[in-house]
Amino acid sequence: MLAANIWHWWIGVVLFFGLVLVAVAMIAGYLKAVSAQRYDRERMREPLREPGP
C-alpha cells in the first residue's frame, strides 16, 4: 500500500509541472502571436509614405 501512495504522489507532481509548462507555453505563444501582428516585419521595413495631394 505504501508503493501506491508514493506512486500517486509522484504522478501528481509530474502532472502539476506538466500543466504549468503547458500553461507557460500557451501564454508565450499568445504573446508571440499578438506582438507579431503589432510589429509586422514587412510593414516595418517599408518607409513611411507622405500622404498624396
Image (cartoon, helix red, strand yellow):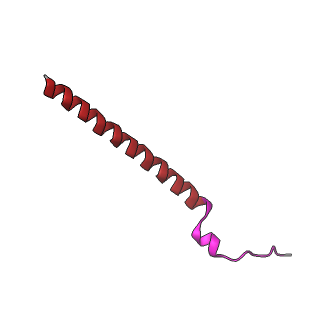
Which picture quadrant has residue 12? top left
Q: Is residue 22 left or right of residue 43?
A: left
Give the number of callouts. Answer: 0
What's the residue at 22%, 29% (across, down)?
A: 8
Please say if 50 is above or below 9.
Answer: below
**Residue that lies at the very extreme toward the top in this rendered image:** 1
Q: Is residue 37 left or right of residue 13?
A: right
Which picture quadrant has residue 10? top left
Q: Is residue 38 left or right of residue 53?
A: left
**Residue closest to the eye, 2 or 40:** 2
47 falls in the magenta region: yes
Please say if 3 is above or below 39.
Answer: above
Which picture quadrant has residue 16? top left
What's the residue at 59%, 72% (across, down)?
A: 42
Pick the quarter of the image with the N terminus: top left
- Place of residue 25 in the rendered image (x, y in percent of width and height, measured from the top left): 42, 50
- Place of residue 23 in the rendered image (x, y in percent of width and height, measured from the top left): 43, 43
The magenta region covers 38-52
What's the residue at 39%, 45% (across, down)?
A: 22
46 falls in the magenta region: yes
- Place of residue 27 in the rendered image (x, y in percent of width and height, measured from the top left): 48, 48
Name the magenta segment's main secondary structure: loop
**Residue closest to the eye, 9 or 30:** 9
**Residue closest to the eye, 33 or 49:** 33
Pick the quarter of the image with the C terminus: bottom right
- Place of residue 14 in the rendered image (x, y in percent of width and height, measured from the top left): 28, 39
Q: Is residue 44 left or right of residue 8?
A: right
Please say if 49 is above or below 36.
Answer: below
What's the residue at 64%, 71% (across, down)?
A: 44
